[in-house]
Every structure is written in C-alpha cells, then in structure tokens.
Amino acid sequence: QVQLVESGGGLVQAGGSLRLSCAASGSIFSPNAMGWYRQAPGKQRELVAVITGGGSTNCADSVKGRFTISRDKNTVLLQMNSLKPEDTAVYYCNAEVILGGMTYVYWGQGTQVTVSS
C-alpha cells in the first residue's frame, strides 16, 4: 500500500506562483511514475503532468511553459508559474507502482488551488 501526502495548495492572484509537493510512503517499491491531475468544478479529472522514475516527463498543452514537474526519489513537485484563473481546480497526486506484472494506481486526497483574477 502506498500513501500520498500532498501539500502546497492555496489562493494566489493571476500571474503568481505556487509549488505543490507530494510524498509517497508505505511501499518498499519506488513508484514507476508519479504525477499530478486536476479537476475543476463540473469537469472531468485531467492530466497536468507526469514524470517517470527515469525522469521522462509529459504535461498538458495548457500548462507547457508554465508548469514544471520534478521528482526526488518518492517525492514529486509541481512548480506552477504564471497561474491563470482557469488553473483553479483540486489537484491530485498520482502514483503508479508496477509489481508482478500488475499496475497499482494510488491517489492523494487532493489539494485546492484557487487563482483569482
């Protein structure tokens, strides 16, 4: 079992910055991939950015050039710059562990990010 503890959400004005952090614990196996998803009111949860254990990254077109994902062992960071009101959402940390040919997916509780105009 993997536990994900998120921190760093909050309220910021448009153009500001926030950094989200997510620490994974509880498993002796390092997650294969860790990332961030977000869900705005009335919308589906969407991928924001993901990073593999090897350091490969992928992010949504809407955040390219503004958000940066990084990882240090079992902690993943999301640096969010030039925030826009449309970035307002609950941000969820995600981790995938591959074990015995099976993929196990874990989610954090979510942290609210609110960007005021």
Image (spheres, rainbow, N blue to C red):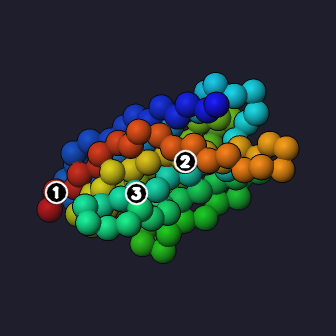
- SS label for mark 2: strand
Q: Nearer the viewer, residue 49 or 82?
A: 49
Tell which tag, 3 or 1, sits nearer the viewer.
Answer: 3
Whether residue 110 sits left or right of residue 106 in the image: it is: left
Amino acid, disc 1:
Ser
Whether residue 50 sits left or right of residue 7 in the image: it is: right
- The reply to whether discs 3 and 2 touch (Cβ–Cβ < 8 Å) is no
Tag on residue 94? 2
- The reply to whether discs 3 and 1 touch (Cβ–Cβ < 8 Å) is no
Q: Which residue is mark 3?
A: 38
Real-space CA distance between mark 3 and mark 1, rounded to the nearest whole angstrom: 17 Å
What quarter of the picture does the N terminus occupy? Answer: top right
Q: Nearer the viewer, residue 70 or 86?
A: 86
- Residue 66 can be seen, yes or no: no
Q: For the view shown, which residue lies furthest in the right direction?
A: 100
Q: Residues within 10 Å of mark 1 (few under 14, many from 20)?
A: some
Amino acid, disc 3:
Arg
